[in-house]
Image: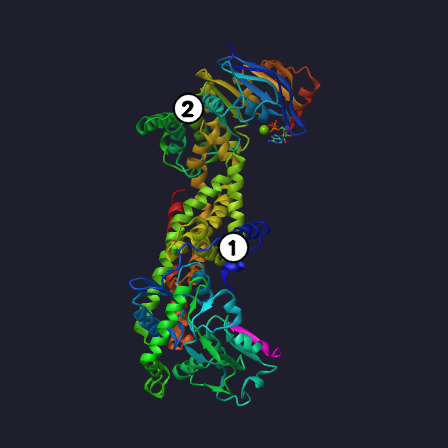
């Protein structure tokens, strides 16, 4: 479980406050600011497409590049419309909120058209027909299809249409996984009887890294993938459908299908001989750099802010101390994940400022860590002997001078160890920003694991990189502590 | 004019009446010693004199200025009155010299060089000229208390308050602190001292006040109060003190 969740103590006031703000944002009429093109002419415009590139062969990251059927199709659609295409790779949990918040114009991420989704989202004409299928171990002959999963445990990727299939079989126990490769790994390990997933994706993984598995039984569903848009983007929908039709008519669509799903594709793509360690390490290094950068920036900003809040809580004016107390309550009492989503998706609509994902991530981590830092400083200040403040006052110092020259220097020594802990917790919790598309270390690991179909090779490596990232922090803190000790 | 004038001073903490009508006058250059049983309000009285506590009732005047609830006026008072605490309250993150120079630099805005010269002078006065760079943790209790005295003196106070300055010290360290206080008294410093060191009181004090139950019970020269007490409560207290 995630540390920041473990530290989460629900505070009714905090949740109520966030809930209230949220309600304001989602209230009808509080729409996004960018008006859809009414003319239907997209020439020279930029189409922003969101995707979760952990789903080969539809979308994945290869050597730092987005590749896959959806990606090529999206580029072709852009070409047809004379528009530039800009891709954003983000986690599947985040794609629809981002679309609705106006961060993207389209989502192409092997999205199945379902009635539930159609209530909130608009779909293009279907562009691919897939179906759910069961994957099982090669040596487990008892699994022959969906019926044979009754009374057993099956895995699916979270938020996918596989859940709908299994809803009809209540005696199958369902486990949800953040990405399909983790479900398949658990199947391989013997913890699941089967995995239900998209047939082409299952085929891809079995072909690439999970040779011990097989697909079995009939296609359980006929599912149609569609390109997702906001319901009010009518002109865009018309234009996209027109482009899809032209691509079909010209044969380019069929060529693309043949490239990815034709018989030649199945043979031509040999199973990977091994993990390309060099490029994996480079990707993880980049992820680690982002993780470290986010953490250091958030700490640099969060330390003074937290100190300010801690001092504010001691301030004479009731309003100031109340506000600072409320700040700590709200930010400590709500999950970081919720705060990240709120700042990225809701704040722009409340304030009319559009934050880049990186800024939103730094802001969310800063505001969150400041609340913890404030509490650490508060405890540190409280642990200084009250006689110190009296002695300072008796010498004629103002309370600000007493704080600055007498209390804080002593408090700082007391707070170094808990501040180090906070820094490390923040470093690990920063993985939550993957929900707004930051390819930090955890997300890089996720992408690599699914691209290479090798979760067992990637995740231990991710752990090592986290360890490497925390070491400088702990070394720095230890050195600081030693220096302060020597001063006594 | 009297340096300190206290009239009908009451101090309450919630429902507890700690001081119940204290009258006191201290002339410049006078050394006044307060004695009395634990909890009778001696510390509270000193804290009222230096503005760390405000009167609940009655009046405290220092140098003709009444003590009142006003941050600026209180800061001005703190500058004129030095306080030495039972438990020293030295700043542990600063060296002896820095402890002494901090307030002159930050409160009086004294230039660093001048403050350092002053600090070294003050430390020599308490016979610690050679320990200027030591941190409090490296000093004995007696040395720490002498640094605390130097720290208070560096603000050039008109009045010095001592709240049981030697009662947290090992017996063999008491003498060095009392010696410094004797020297101060000889130089004419006005001092209010809470102490149970009867020898010091007898030698140095101009006046001894016996407090009990938040009131001044007996008052006079050391000879009168310590040798020939009139009040039974004073006699009882002194005999218990001698039995220790
Ligand atoms: N800030 C305070 N709040 C409540 N009670 C106090 C406070 N300061 C002192 N007292 C009480 O006042 C009484 C006198 O305290 P004090 O002046 O320290 O006595 P002494 O120094 O003579 O031993 C004690 O009973 C003490 O508990
Ligand atoms: Mg006392």
- The quarter of the picture where the C terminus of chain A appears is top left
Q: Which mark is residue A28?
A: 1
**In the visual, does A214 lie left or right of A65?**
right
**In the visual, does A68 lie left or right of A100?**
left
**Is label 2 within 8 A of ligand 2 (CB to nearest ligand atom)?**
no
* As drawn, B62 above or below A118: above
Whole-number angstrom distance, CA of label 2 to CA of label 1: 66 Å
Pick whichever, B175 or A212, lies toward us: A212
Decide: marks 2, 1 in contact (CB < 8 A)? no
Q: Which mark is residue B195?
A: none
Q: Which residue is mark 2?
A: B155
Mark 1 Cα shell of 10 Å, populated few (<14), some (14-19), many (≥20): few
Q: Position of residue B97 (x, y in %)?
A: 38, 32
Q: Secondary structure at mark 2?
A: loop
Q: Is residue B194 visible?
A: no
The residue segment tinted magenta is A167-176
Mark 2 Cα shell of 10 Å, populated few (<14), some (14-19), many (≥20): many
């Amino acid at each position: 479980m995630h540390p920041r969740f473990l530290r989460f103590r629900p505070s009714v006031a905090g949740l109520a406050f966030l809930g209230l703000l949220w309600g304001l944002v989602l209230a009808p009429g509080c729409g996004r600011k960018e008006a859809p093109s009414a003319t239907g002419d997209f020439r020279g415009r930029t189409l922003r497409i969101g995707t979760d590139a952990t789903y080969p062969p539809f979308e994945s990251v290869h050597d730092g590049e987005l590749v896959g059927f959806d990606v090529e199709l999206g580029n072709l659609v852009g070409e047809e419309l004379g528009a530039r295409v800009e891709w954003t790779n983000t986690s599947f949990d985040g794609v629809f909120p981002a679309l609705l918040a106006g961060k993207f114009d389209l989502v192409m991420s092997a999205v199945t058209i379902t009635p539930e989704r159609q209530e909130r989202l608009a779909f293009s004409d279907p562009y691919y027909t897939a179906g759910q299928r069961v994957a099982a171990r090669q040596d487990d002959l008892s699994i022959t299809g969906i019926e044979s999963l009754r009374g057993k445990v099956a895995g699916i990727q979270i938020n996918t249409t596989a859940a709908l299939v299994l809803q009809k079989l209540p005696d199958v126990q369902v486990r949800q996984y953040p990405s399909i490769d983790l479900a398949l790994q658990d199947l391989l390990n013997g913890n699941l009887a089967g995995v239900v997933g998209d047939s082409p994706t299952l085929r891809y993984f079995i072909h690439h890294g999970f040779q011990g598995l097989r697909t079995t039984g009939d296609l359980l569903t006929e599912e149609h993938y569609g390109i997702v848009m906001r319901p009010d983007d009518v002109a865009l929908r018309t234009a996209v459908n027109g482009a899809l039709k032209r691509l079909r008519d010209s044969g380019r669509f069929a060529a693309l299908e043949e490239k990815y799903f034709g018989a030649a594709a199945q043979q031509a793509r040999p199973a990977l001989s091994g993990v390309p360690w060099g490029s994996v390490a480079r990707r993880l290094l980049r992820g680690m750099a982002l993780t470290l950068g986010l953490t250091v920036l958030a700490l640099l900003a969060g330390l003074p802010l937290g100190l300010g809040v801690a001092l504010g809580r001691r301030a004479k004016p009731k309003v100031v101390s109340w506000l600072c107390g409320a700040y700590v309550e709200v930010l400590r009492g709500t999950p970081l994940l919720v705060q990240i989503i709120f700042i990225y998706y809701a704040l722009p609509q409340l304030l009319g400022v559009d934050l880049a994902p990186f800024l939103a991530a730094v802001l969310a981590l800063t505001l969150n860590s400041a609340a913890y830092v404030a509490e650490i400083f508060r405890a540190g200040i409280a642990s200084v002997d009250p006689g110190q403040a009296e002695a300072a006052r008796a010498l004629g110092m103002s309370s600000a001078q007493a704080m600055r020259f007498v209390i804080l220097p002593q408090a700082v020594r007391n707070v170094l160890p808990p501040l180090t802990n906070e820094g490390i917790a923040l470093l690990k919790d920063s993985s939550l920003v993957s929900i707004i598309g930051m390819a930090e270390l955890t997300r890089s690991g996720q992408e690599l694991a699914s691209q290479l179909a090798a979760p067992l090779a990637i995740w231990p490596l991710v752990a090592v990189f986290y360890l490497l990232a925390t070491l400088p922090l702990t070394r720095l803190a230890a050195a600081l502590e030693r220096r302060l000790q020597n001063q006594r | 004019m009297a340096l300190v004038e206290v009239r009908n001073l009451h101090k309450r903490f919630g429902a507890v009446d700690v001081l119940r009508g204290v009258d006191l006058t201290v002339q410049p250059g006078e050394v006044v010693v307060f004695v009395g049983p634990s909890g009778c309000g001696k510390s509270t009285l000193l804290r009222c004199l230096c503005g760390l506590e405000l009167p609940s009732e009655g009046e405290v005047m220092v140098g003709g200025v009444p003590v009142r609830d006003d941050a600026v006026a209180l800061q001005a008072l703190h500058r004129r009155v030095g306080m030495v605490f039972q438990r020293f309250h030295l700043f542990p993150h600063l060296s002896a010299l820095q402890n002494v120079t901090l307030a002159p630099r930050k409160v009086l805005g004294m230039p660093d060089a001048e403050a350092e010269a002053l600090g070294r002078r003050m430390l020599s006065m308490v016979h610690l000229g050679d320990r200027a760079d030591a941190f409090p943790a490296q000093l004995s209790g007696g040395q720490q208390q002498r640094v605390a005295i130097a720290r208070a003196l560096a603000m050039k106070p008109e009045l010095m308050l001592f709240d049981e300055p030697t009662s947290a010290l090992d017996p063999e360290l008491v003498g060095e602190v009392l010696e410094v206080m004797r020297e101060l008294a000889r130089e004419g410093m006005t001092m209010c001292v809470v102490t149970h060191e009867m020898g010091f009181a007898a030698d140095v004090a101009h006046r001894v006040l016996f407090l009990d139950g938040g009131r001044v019970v007996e008052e006079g020269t050391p000879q009168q109060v310590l040798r020939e007490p009139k009040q039974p409560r004073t006699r009882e207290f002194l005999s218990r003190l001698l039995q220790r």
